Amino acid sequence: MKFEKEEVANLAAEFVNDVFKKAGLDLSASAQVADGCVEIDVSGSDADLVLADNARVLYSVNHLVNQIFYRQSKDGYNFFLDCNEYRAEREAELELMAVKAAEKACSSGLRVSLQPMPSSERRIIHLALAEDQTVRTESQGTGRYRRVLIVPESA
């Protein structure tokens, strides 16, 4: 059965709340529909646990929600979990990191390798430098060790 956006948003938020409750975490999730995706905001006194280790739990739950609910939604909505605005702040941090790494690659003439990161974060790096004619970006590695390389165009 396929669900409308509002319906699947509520089901996804309920699922996230159940996961946290069964894990014994003091967290609650609420969903809202925005620009072709479902945003689920997580908050509570155990937020630090969800954000520990580069938000590994947050990204893992986000992956689960996408795997479960994407196919149940009528138009294949993407789900985006955030906790205490972590992902918005992380996006700004990644964009700055991309610019600084591009500057370093251009000044040194060498490739700059960033730390391994999830695909959603690598995408932010690629997009941040997409218009920069002085460098190109490549992904390297596999699985959780996949990283972005920033290559000066002169190389």
Image (cartoon, rainbow, N blue to C red):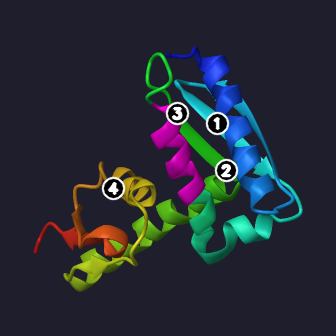
Amino acid on which disc 3 is placed: Phe
Mark 4 and 3 residues: CB-CB less than 8 Å, in contact? no
Determine whether the residue tagged by mark 2 lies in a helix, strand or loop. Answer: strand
Q: Earlier in the sequence, mark 4 or mark 2?
A: 2
Residue range (magenta): 60-70
Determine whether the residue tagged by mark 1 lies in a helix, strand or loop. Answer: strand
Q: Earlier in the sequence, mark 2 or mark 1?
A: 1
- Residue 39 figure quarter: top right
Mark 3 and 2 residues: CB-CB less than 8 Å, in contact? no
Q: Earlier in the sequence, mark 3 or mark 1?
A: 1
Mark 4 crowdedness (10 Å alpha carbons): few <14, some 14-19, many ≥20: some
- Residue 75 figure quarter: top left
Q: Which residue is mark 3?
A: 69
Mark 2 and 1 residues: CB-CB less than 8 Å, in contact? yes
| Residue 42 part of the magenta-drawn span | no
Give the x, y percent position of residue 54: 59, 72
Give the x, y percent position of residue 62: 56, 50
Amino acid on which disc 2 is placed: Asp
Q: Which residue is mark 2?
A: 82
Q: Earlier in the sequence, mark 3 or mark 2?
A: 3
Residue lying at 34% horizontally and 79% vertically, measured from the top left? 104
Looking at the image, the residue that sits furthest to the left is: 155
Q: Nearer the viewer, residue 60 or 103?
A: 60
Q: Which residue is mark 1?
A: 39
Q: Earlier in the sequence, mark 1 or mark 4?
A: 1
